[in-house]
Image: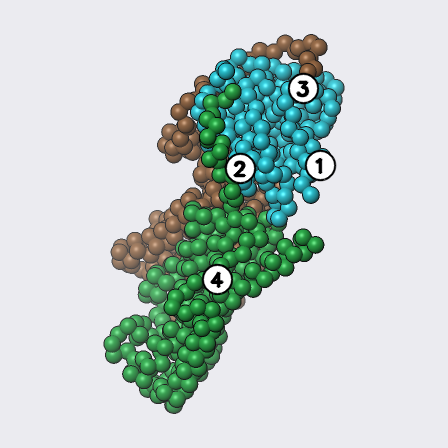
Amino acid sequence: MPTLQPDKIISKNLSEKNGSDYESIKSLPVPPLQGAAWKWSCGLLMAYVIYGAFFIANGAVGFGKTGNPARIVFFHVPSAILSSVCYVIGTIYAVSYLWKSPKAEIDIRSSIAMELGFVFCILATVTGSIFAGAQWGSFWNWDPREISIVIMLLLYASYLVLRGAITDDWEKRARLCAVYAIVALIPAQFLIWVVPRIPAVASLHPTNVLVKPSGTSMSYKEVLYPAFIAFTMLYIWMTQLRIRAWNLTQSSISRKARA
Amino acid sequence: MIQSQVSVIFNAVSHRYGGREVFTGVNASVQSGQTAVVSGSNGSGKSTLLKIAAGLLSAKSGDVDIHIDGRLCNQMERRRDIGYLSPDLSLYGELTAAENLQFFANMQGIHLTKIDLTHTLTKVGLQGRGRDLVRAYSSGMRQRLKYAYALLGNPRILLLDEPTANLDTAGVELVENIVAEHTRRADGCLTILATNEPREMNWGDQHIVLKAAE
Amino acid sequence: MGRPAHRIESRRVIEAKELEIAPKTHNFFSHGILAEAVSLLKKDLLAEIRTRVAICAVGVFAFSALLLIGLATASLKDTQTISTLSGISRPAWDATSKMSLLWVLLCFAAFAGLAHTFVHEEEAGTVLALRMNAAPESIYFGKFAFNMILLSGVAVCVTPVYVLLTQMPTGSIGLFVLLMGSGCFGLAGTATIIGAIAAKAGGSGALFGAIGLPLLVVFLMLLMNASSTLFTVDAAPVRCVRDIGGLLSYGILIAAVSVLTFKFVWED
C-alpha cells in the first residue's frame, strides 16, 4: 500500500476546484443603494447634469465666440477618465483570475469592465473629436491625448477580438485574455505617464485644469462634480445590467443543454 | 504491508470540456510493479486521463497524486519521472532522430554520448536510421522513435497512450518487452496504458474502465 | 498475464539518472532555465537553417516593403515643409520620418513571421513533448532569443539598404546601433508573447497582427522620440539617456511581464 493516510483522501477537495461554466454571478452589492434604486438615482443625477450643462454653466472665455464648446467637458472628461479606469479594473480582475481565483465569475467581470471601457472610450473619442472640430478647426489633430485615446480604443478592440477568436474552451479564453490584458497594460501605462511628457509632442489639451483651484469657475464645479458621480453610477448600473444579461444567456444555454 | 516506491493514485478525478462531462469520479491506485490498463469507448477520456496523470492538464475536480519514494511530487517535478507517449505528441520532423533524442536529453540535463544514442536506437529497432530526418520516417518508425524518447533518462513511470499504434508484429512484441521489463525494474516502476486492443489489455494486472458520461 | 516469448537482449543504455529526492528548483543561473533555453535556441536555429520558413517570411516581407516604400517616397524631397498646428514649419521628409517609416516596416515584417516559432510547435504537435521537458520560463527565453536573433539579422540586412535608398542620416553611429538594438529588443519581446497567445488561440497570422500591432503604437512613439534625439546635433547626454532609456525600458517591461505570465499561456 502507498504511503498515504486514509484521512488525507477524505480531506481531499472533492468540491469544484474551478468555477463552472454555468455558474450564475451575483450582482454587485453596492451600498448604499440596492437594485432599481441605482437606476432611478443615476437617471435623476444624469438629468441634472444634462440640464446643468446647458443652463447652469456659463460659456467659458476662450472657447469660440460664445464659449459654448466648453460645455462638452461635462460629458467628455468623465467618459475619458472612466475609459482608463475601466481598463485598470479589468486588469485587476485579470491578475486576480491568474494568481488568486480562477473562477468564471472573475473572468466575466474582467470582460464586462473591458466592454464598458470600450463603450466609454468610443464616447470620449467622439465627443473629443466634435469638440476639436468646433474649437481647433479640425476633427483630428494628432494631439498626444487624441493619440492616446485612439490607442486605448485599439487596445480595447483587440482585447475583444481575442475574446471573440477563442470559442472552444472558456478557461483557455480566460487565461489568454487575462495575460493579454496584463501585457497591454504596459503601453496603456506608458500612454498615461510617459507620452504626455515627451517634449516633442506639445499637447493642445489643458493640463491639470481640474486640480488647480483657479482652473474652473464655480458654475462649472456645480455641474462637473455631479457629472463625475453620475457617470460612475452609470458605470455601476451598466455593469449590473450586463451581469444580469450574462446570467440570462447562461441559464438559457443550460436549459437548451438539458432539453 | 510493504512501502511502495512509486505510486499513482487517482482521487475522484473528473474532467469536462466546456460543459460536456468526459468522466466523473475516477478512483484508482497503481503501485510499483503493476501495469494498469485504462480502457473505454472512443471519447470516454482515456487520453485525457493520461494527460492529467502526466501533469499536462489539470483536472476540473479531484487530482492525481504521484508519490516517488514516499515524496508527493507536484506538477512540474513529476514530469521528470514520467515517460509519456501519445498519438498527440510528435517529435521534430525537421530534425534527425539522433538530433531529436539529443535535444530532449539536453532539456532533461542528461549527457547522451554517441554510443548511448546508437544503443537507444538499436533497442527500438531503428539502427542505422539515426541520421535520417524524422519527416522521412514512416508512421511505425515514428512510433518506435517515440519509445526511444519516452525511455530517455529511465523514468520510473511510463504512461503509454495507444502503445502499439501503427506498429507491426515485431513492434508490438518490442513494446510488450519494454513494458514487461520496465514494470519489473528493481527500483520500483509502473506502467499505465490506455488502449482498447484485447492483446494489450492482457498485459495489465489492473483495469480502469471509463464509461462515457451521458 | 501474457509474458513475452523471448526477450530481446537489452542492456541499460543510458545511465540511470540520479534519483533526486529534493525537489528540483529551476534557477536561472545553475542548470535549469538557462541551459534549457540555450538548447531550445540551438534546436530552433538548426531547424530554421534547414527549413528557412521564418527567415523567408520576415526577410522577403521586409525587402518587398522596402521596395514599395522606396518607390512611394521617391518623389519626396528633404526641402518640402509642412506647418504644424503650433505654427512651426518643419521638413516633411526629415530624418525622424524616415526612421519611423523604417520601423513601421520592421514592425510589419516582424508580425509577418515571428509567430511561426510557436505556431509551428502547436501545429506539428511537438508542443506536448516540449511541455513535458522544460519549464515555461525556459521556453520563453529560448523563443525570445530566437526571435531577437532573427529580427536583428533582418534589421542588419535591411537598414543599410534603407539608409542608401532614402539617404537617411545615421547620427552618431554608436547611438544609432544602440537605438536599433533597443528597438529590436522591444519588438521581439512583444512579438514573442503575442505570438504565443495567438498560437494558443488557434488563430493564424490575422489574429497575431490584430492583437499585436496596437501594442506597438506606443512603442513606435517612443522610438520616434528617441530617433529625434538621435538626429539632433549635440543633443544633451541626459536627453539621450532619457529617450533611449525610455525605449529600452519599454522592452524590458514587456519581457518582464511576459516571463511572469507566460506559464498561463503555455500550460493547459
Q: Report the chain shown in green.
A: A
Q: Please give the name of the residue rendered at 48% of the width and 44% of the height, measured from the top-left corner.
A: C264
Kindly identify which chain the residue marked by label 3 belongs to. Answer: B
Compared to B22, does C23 lie above or below?
Answer: above
Q: How far apart are marks 4 and 1 (CA)?
A: 41 Å
Q: Please give the name of the residue rendered at 29% of the width and 58% of the height, measured from the top-left corner.
A: C239
**Which residue in the protein does label 3 denote?**
B203
Q: How far apart are marks 4 and 2 (CA)?
A: 29 Å
Q: Which of marks 1 and 2 is nearer the N terminus?
A: 1
**Which residue in the protein does label 4 denote?**
A27
Q: In what element is the residue under mark 1?
A: loop
Q: Distance between the residues labelled 2 and 3?
A: 28 Å
**Which residue in the protein does label 2 denote?**
B62
Tell me, yes or no, whether dots 3 and 4 are on the same chain: no
Chain B drawn in what color? cyan
Q: Where is residue C259 in the image (x, y as percent from the top left)?
A: 43, 43
- Among all residues in the image, which is located at the extreme bottom? A66
Q: Earlier in the sequence, mark 2 or mark 3?
A: 2
The 10 Å Cα crowd at callout 4, few under 14, some 14 to 19, many 20 or more, is some
Instruction: Determine contact: label 1, label 2, CB under 8 Å.
Output: no
Kind of residue at badge 2: Gly
Kind of residue at badge 3: Trp
Kindly identify which chain the residue marked by label 2 belongs to. Answer: B
Q: How far apart are marks 1 and 2 (CA)?
A: 23 Å
Q: Position of residue C168 (x, y in %)?
A: 43, 58
Which quadrant of the view contains residue B30? top right
